[in-house]
Image: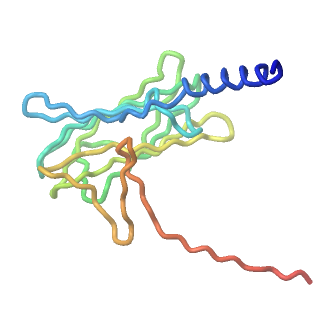
Amino acid sequence: MKKTVLILVPLLIVGLYANSKKIDPEETTTVKSIGEKTIIEGTTVGKYSKPGAPIDMSYKTTKVDTNETADVNITLTTTAQSGRVVVNITLDDKLTLVNNLDMNQSFEIAPNSKLFNIDMKVRAETDGLYYIRLLTKVEKGQHPKLRSFAVPVMVGENPKPKTKAGVSFLKAKSGENISVSKAVETIKVIEEK
């Protein structure tokens, strides 16, 4: 009996500790109506991420009608103490950049400079849910670490995500798109001579 109690108590404590560290399942994106404008905000700060670059992102976009300009404000933060943050920005096909912005950004990290802003204006001619994609990396030492982000831009009355032929999109509980693709696996047997 004593041995059973001694074994179960540590397991119970470990189980309670693990349960208290569960990831918050709440969505990272919020939609607010302010007057006639609809604002979409999101953040990765405090949410689980795969190991990669020590970078987090927050964004704020405005929902617009077709051919109207949407303001997109992106803020990158890092916990790195030194190095450079390099950002490569790409837009969905039918989303057009309106302002003059370099699609390859670079920021020096300093103890008093760990917050980096990217402000852009975009427009689309057709209704849809479009994405601005950021591939970020922290250049420090020989092995840079990468992390990617996607910022949604809603255009029109009923924005729907674009779909590609042969690819279907599903939604996770957090609202993120999950791409389901077919795969073919070939196994070759190599004969030993």
The quarter of the image holding the N terminus is top right
Q: Residue furthest top?
A: 112
Q: Residue at x 27, y 51 (%)?
A: 130
- Decide if residue 107 is in sight here: yes
The quarter of the image holding the C terminus is bottom right
Rendered view: 132 above or below 81: below
Q: Nearer the viewer, residue 50 or 62?
A: 50
Rendered view: 62 above or below 130: above
Q: Residue at x 61, y 40 (%)?
A: 144
Which of the 4 image quadrants contains residue 16?
top right
Image x and y of residue 118, in percent: 34, 34
Q: Nearer the viewer, residue 64 or 95?
A: 64
Q: Is residue 166 left or right of residue 111?
A: left
Q: Nearer the viewer, residue 23 or 188?
A: 23
Q: Is residue 188 left or right of residue 182?
A: right
Q: Nearer the viewer, residue 93 or 24?
A: 24
Q: Residue furthest left?
A: 36
Q: Is residue 102 left or right of residue 34?
A: right
Q: Residue furthest right?
A: 193
- Decide if residue 57 is in sight here: no
Image x and y of residue 179, in percent: 42, 58
Q: Residue at x 89, y 80 (%)?
A: 192
